[in-house]
């Protein structure tokens, strides 16, 4: 992307500083390809009107005078003449508007623009540059380019201007007045004798010579421009909006058969010169069906979780999008030649780190270093079973984490989990997560209004993270789903008090999952360690006290197993907590941290040495008293200096000459004896060494504690599971929720009086959501074709079915009276991935193109699902021909519509419609009903949007007219068919 970034963003209101160059006024046929003499240029460009005087006024907000054309100008201003400079450059100002020229000859309108151009206020910064020679750019301070982001702008220049050896001159304006400035009255317009380009245009010409078969999308400031033939092509072939490059992180889009090259340049602050470079190239292969391999290793250092996967993805990168939406990474490690910068931090590493040979050596060395402790050999054998491509990615992760001392989290292979486990979890792709608003709403991209927000009533941070995984990975095994449902039912209906006590334990629990991981990486402070370990110790004590009651009163296997394992897994915390001095731990004092120094001999030794020196210094005070003949002398500490001997100035003459004066006041002076100087220095050295020794012993203490890391992590996982189950139980109390029945035998969805889980909560008690039934089965009705008026609730209905299905397979209660669901493996949005066990939701497929093409696409797609796939399908459409599939497949397809009422008070005979002041007024009932809706009643939506009445009347009349003509043509076809 060629980027002409300004030193500061221009003020949108200051149009005088953003004015297009003169070449905007001339057509490409003339100004780009004409290379004749000055006389030829004169004959072509100039008419008698062109010889009129043109004056540019430079503003100075002081005194003004009135001239004959009734325009106020400054007395101190001087006019700048259009004319030839010594370097054959031309001082030409820029207008504040983009001009487009589509004719090959100059018309009178062009010269009107020139007159307006000459009278416009010039920019404040005016700089004149030297001629452009060769391929060098001219560096000019504070220069400003025209910012034109619309693809319709056709800047008039052509690469042939340079390839033909034309003497090209470029120009800027400058803030110093030209030497040939004259009075306003005697200024004349002189003809240009050479083709004039701006430096930005010259840069484009150079780049265009290198990429003749590509469209160049040029970034100017924070918008985009197309030049020459590229602008003509994009104007005719594409619709490109003028959007700031910083708004969505998108670098630019365009289309051409051979590809699209984008460039990036930058202002170098030191040399202020302009360097273009290739940013990225988009080729035609982006729309091919080629599959690309992707390898991923994801590490969560704060929790210790490691995810890996390898997959094939299309050019649309749908699987990659799904992965990023699910993981939401904050840093990405890539080979240097892959992708470009994005909002996510991207760390580029040398390609050699991703080669298998180097990766294999890195991994064997990394895990081989642990063989001495008996764990490395087993870990290495498990890691080497991974795919080679995964090992290449893992090696780069190890190398990167080593820079931050976080690589230890990879030692345990039990932390590694495959991300796309299609046998365990329902696959929710990126489009499904966004369209169903699973994690975030589509209005402001926040959590409120999403399914996760409705289900999230967790008390802990680690519980919330686990619930997010549950929501994005619904289960496929009925035994695991029913296990969660049993736990939720236990909490909802059990009268045992032990569950209430367990729930109260979760309140105000800090994020111990991140805490133990911070301890594992030795990144924690003493205070954090004490907080985490004391919290876990208190939880162990509390849960252990409840074990007898849990064994008797808790029946759900998921809760029973999780709660009983927690005390045993946390039993090691008390041993380490008992070694710490609580007061020292709370303030982070490592020198006094450990109670029993038998386990820390180095600290004990250093303390004894310090104590010996202190005793010697204290004994030395007796010698000082004898020397000064003053039994009351004692050591004082002032400004951090210890063991100072304070002597009054009146008797300072009695102080030995070898004493060193430290400080003094008007009354006293303070000294160190040679003995104190020597021993005080030794004492400080011992104290510093004690700090180092305490840090060393502290790290060793953490090493011993980290031997229990995996047990503690498992215990925290059990606590998170309990928190999630309590959260789902709390969500079930929000309304009329029921326990879904999960069946394995067949693919089926039966919902009685189901409600949209999110909308029902957002409406609250003031408005009541209308419940609806749903029945889909592989042996009978597999497809529901849903029609009805706009805003009638069709989309909400199909999303309701999908969300209820997802909630059921999460293990949650659902908003309905009765639900029976067969295991669904995918809420599919991609035809290639749908199976007979998928729930396919298609909302108005075929819109956005012509009616005939849209009907054809929708009809063929729906028939494909009916005949070939056999999935459970909800198909929303406004195309009546699709409803005819019910006749072709009466067993599997049935038509429905969202019911409504038409206000009959406004109905009049069709012949009297022109005098009719109203059109059909629709009342939505939001109830799913069999049969096809006769109309979509789009005019009613227009009325709700406050479209003017006159427009509505005209639209209603035209709608009736088109409907009549369509009915007549349909009748004619039937009659012709009947006659034949």
Image (cartoon, rainbow, N blue to C red):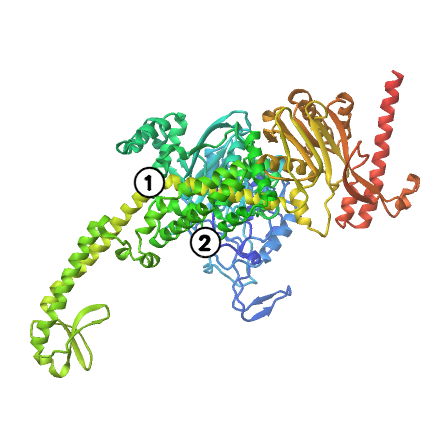
- x and y, in percent, of residue 333 in the image: 41, 38
Q: Residue furthest bottom?
A: 650
Disc 2: which residue: 7
Q: Report, in whole angstroms, how far the alpha carbon at label 2 lies from the one at label 1.
A: 55 Å
Q: Say what secondary structure mark 2 lies in.
A: loop
**Residue 42: quarter of image:** top right
- x and y, in percent, of residue 705 in the image: 32, 44
| Mark 2 neighbour density, 10 Å: few (under 14) some (14–19) many (20 or more) | few
Q: Quadrant of the C terminus?
A: top right
Side of 911 relative to 8 (left or right): right
- x and y, in percent, of residue 55 in the image: 56, 59
Q: Say what secondary structure mark 1 lies in.
A: loop
Disc 1: which residue: 707
Is residue 640 at all visible to an observer of this figure? yes
- Residue nearest the observer in this picture, 6 or 640: 640
Specify which label sits upstream in the sequence, 2 or 1.
2
Q: Kindly report which numbered mark, 2 or 1, lies closer to the viewer in this rendering.
A: 1
Is residue 216 at all visible to an observer of this figure? no
- Residue nearest the observer in this picture, 958 or 875: 875
Q: Residue furthest top?
A: 980
- Residue nearest the observer in this picture, 157 or 896: 896
Side of 565 relative to 490 (left or right): left
- x and y, in percent, of residue 551 in the image: 49, 40
- Above or below, 478 against 665 in this view is above
- Residue nearest the observer in this picture, 106 or 333: 333
Q: Mark 1 and mark 2 in contact (Cβ < 8 Å)?
A: no
Q: Residue at x 78, y 22 (%)?
A: 887
């Amino acid at each position: 992307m060629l980027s002409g970034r300004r030193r500061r963003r221009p003020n949108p209101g200051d149009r005088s500083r953003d004015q297009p160059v003169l070449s905007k006024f001339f057509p490409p046929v003339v100004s780009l390809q004409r290379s004749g003499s000055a006389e030829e240029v004169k004959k072509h460009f100039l008419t008698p009107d062109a010889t009129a005087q043109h004056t540019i006024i430079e503003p100075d907000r002081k005194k003004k005078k009135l001239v004959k054309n009734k325009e106020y100008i400054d007395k101190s201003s001087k006019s700048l003449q259009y004319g030839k400079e010594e370097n054959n450059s031309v001082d030409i100002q820029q207008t504040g508007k983009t001009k487009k020229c589509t004719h090959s000859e100059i018309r009178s309108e062009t010269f009107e623009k020139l007159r307006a151009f000459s009278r416009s206020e010039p920019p404040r910064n005016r700089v004149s540059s030297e001629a452009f020679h060769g391929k060098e750019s001219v560096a000019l301070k504070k220069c400003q380019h025209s910012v034109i982001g619309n693809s319709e702008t056709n800047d008039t220049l052509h690469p042939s201007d340079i390839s033909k050896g034309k003497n090209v001159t470029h120009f800027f304006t400058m803030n110093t007045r030209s030497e040939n400035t004259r009075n306003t009255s005697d200024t004349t317009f002189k003809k240009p004798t050479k083709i004039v380009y701006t430096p930005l245009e010259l840069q484009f010409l150079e780049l265009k010579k290198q990429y003749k078969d590509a469209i160049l999308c040029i970034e100017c400031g924070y918008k985009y421009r197309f030049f020459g033939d590229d602008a003509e092509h994009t104007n005719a072939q594409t619709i490109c909006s003028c959007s700031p490059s910083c708004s969505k992180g998108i670098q630019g889009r365009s289309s051409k058969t051979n590809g699209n090259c984008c460039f990036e340049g930058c202002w170098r602050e030191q040399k202020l010169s302009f360097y273009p470079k290739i940013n990225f190239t988009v080729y035609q292969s982006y729309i091919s069906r080629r599959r690309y391999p992707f390898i991923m290793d994801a590490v969560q250092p704060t929790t210790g979780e490691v995810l890996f996967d390898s997959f094939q993805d299309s050019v649309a990168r749908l699987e990659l999008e799904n992965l990023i939406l699910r993981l939401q990474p904050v840093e990405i490690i890539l080979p240097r030649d892959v992708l470009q910068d994005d909002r996510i931090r991207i760390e580029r590493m040398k390609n050699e780190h991703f080669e298998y040979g180097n990766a294999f050596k890195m991994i064997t060395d990394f895990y081989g270093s642990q063989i001495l402790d008996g764990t490395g050999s087993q870990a290495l054998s498990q890691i080497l079973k991974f795919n080679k491509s995964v090992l290449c990615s893992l090696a780069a992760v190890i190398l990167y984490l080593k820079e931050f001392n976080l690589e230890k989290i990879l030692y345990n292979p039990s932390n590694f989990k495959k991300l796309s486990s299609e046998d365990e979890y329902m696959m929710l792709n990126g489009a499904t997560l966004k369209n169903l608003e699973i994690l975030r709403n589509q209005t402001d991209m926040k959590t409120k209004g999403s399914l996760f927000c409705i289900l999230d009533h967790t008390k802990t941070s680690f519980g919330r993270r686990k619930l997010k995984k549950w929501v994005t990975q619904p289960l496929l095994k009925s035994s695991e789903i029913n296990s969660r449902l049993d736990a939720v039912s236990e909490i909802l209906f059990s009268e045992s008090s032990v569950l209430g006590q367990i729930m109260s334990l979760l309140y105000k629990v800090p994020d111990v999952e991140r805490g133990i991981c911070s301890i594992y990486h030795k990144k924690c402070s003493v205070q954090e360690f004490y907080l985490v370990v004391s919290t876990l110790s208190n939880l162990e004590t509390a849960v252990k006290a409840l074990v007898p009651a849990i064994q008797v009163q808790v029946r759900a296997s998921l809760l029973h197993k999780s709660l009983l394992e927690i005390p045993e897994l946390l039993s090691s915390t008390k041993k380490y907590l008992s070694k710490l001095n609580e007061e020292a731990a709370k303030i982070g004092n490592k020198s006094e941290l450990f109670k029993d120094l038998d386990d820390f001999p180095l600290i004990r030794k250093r303390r004894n040495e310090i104590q010996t020196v202190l005793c010697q210094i204290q004994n030395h005070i007796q010698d000082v008293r004898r020397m000064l003949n003053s039994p009351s002398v004692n050591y004082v500490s002032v400004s951090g200096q210890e063991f100072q001997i304070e002597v009054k100035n009146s008797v300072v003459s009695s102080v030995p000459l070898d004493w060193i004066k430290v400080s003094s006041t008007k009354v006293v002076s303070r000294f160190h004896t040679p003995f104190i100087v020597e021993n005080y220095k030794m004492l400080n050295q011992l104290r510093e060494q004690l700090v180092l020794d305490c840090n060393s012993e502290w790290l060793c203490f953490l090493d011993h504690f980290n031997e229990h890391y995996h047990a503690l992590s498992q215990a925290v996982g059990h606590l998170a599971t309990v928190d999630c189950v309590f959260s789902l139980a709390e969500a079930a109390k929000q309304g009329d929720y029921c326990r879904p029945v999960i069946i394995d035998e067949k693919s089926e969805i039966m919902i009685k009086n189901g409600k949209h889980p999110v909308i029902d909560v957002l409406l609250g008690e003031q408005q009541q959501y209308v419940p609806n039934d749903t029945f889909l089965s592989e042996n009978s009705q597999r497809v529901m074709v849903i029609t009805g008026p706009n805003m009638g609730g069709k989309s909400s209905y199909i999303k309701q079915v999908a969300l209820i299905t997802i909630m059921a397979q999460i293990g949650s209660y659902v908003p309905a009276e009765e639900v029976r669901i067969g295991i669904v493996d995918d809420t599919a949005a991609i035809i290639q991935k749908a199976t007979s066990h998928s729930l396919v939701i298609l909302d108005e497929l075929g819109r956005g193109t012509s009616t005939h093409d849209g009907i054809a696409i929708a009809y063929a797609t729906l028939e494909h699902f009916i005949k070939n796939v056999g999935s459970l399908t909800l198909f929303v459409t406004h195309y009546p021909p699709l409803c005819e599939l019910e006749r072709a497949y009466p067993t599997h397809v049935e038509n429905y519509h969202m019911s409504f009422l038409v206000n009959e008070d406004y109905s009049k005979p069709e012949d009297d419609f022109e005098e009719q002041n109203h059109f059909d007024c629709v009342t939505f009932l939001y109830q799913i009903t069999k049969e096809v809706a006769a109309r979509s009643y789009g005019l009613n939506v227009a009325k709700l949007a406050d479209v003017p009445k006159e427009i509505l009347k005209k639209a209603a009349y035209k709608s009736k007219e088109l409907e009549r003509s369509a009915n007549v043509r349909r009748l004619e076809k039937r009659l012709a068919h009947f006659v034949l």
